[in-house]
Amino acid sequence: MQETHEGVEITVEDSAPGLTDADLTHVFERLYRCEESRSRDLGGSGLGLSICQQIMLAHEGRIYAEHSLLGGVKFVVVLPPE
């Protein structure tokens, strides 16, 4: 977590496996699941990141995903100053 000119930035990243470029462009879409092989019994519903994005928009913040230098995915949440 760090303070920037945009507000507070929270970064979470993991190691491999990551997401493809195509998955990164769709990961916040409602009902999108990266692994088509996962059933709803074993995987998520594809709503979590979409809900996170809507929460951030309601608070005038933003959330985005990109490739991590660790080989996985890096999620960044930016909360505006009060």
Image (spheres, rainbow, N blue to C red):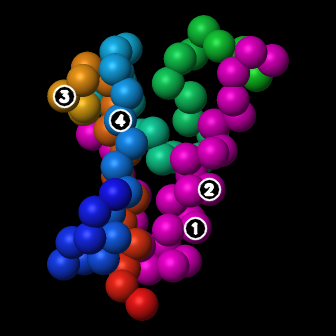
Q: Amino acid at mark 2?
A: Ile
Q: Amino acid at mark 4?
A: Glu
> For residue 55, which numbered disc appears in the image?
1
Can residue 25 be seen at all in this image of the molecule?
Answer: no
CB atoms of marks 1 and 2 within 8 Å: yes
Q: Amino acid at mark 3?
A: Leu
Can residue 61 be seen at all in this image of the molecule?
Answer: yes
Is 64 left or right of 44, judged from the image as shown? left
- Residue depth check, mark 4 versus mark 2: number of the one nearer the observer: 4
Q: Where residue 58 sits: x, y (%)?
A: 55, 77
> Magenta residues?
41-66
Q: Where residue 35 sits: x, y (%)?
A: 53, 17
Q: Residues within 10 Å of mark 1 (few under 14, many from 20)?
A: some
SS at mark 1 in the image: helix
Q: Which residue is mark 4?
A: 13
Is residue 76 a member of the stretch shown in magenta?
Answer: no
Position of the C terminus, as image quadrant, is: bottom left
SS at mark 3 in the image: loop
CB atoms of marks 1 and 4 within 8 Å: no
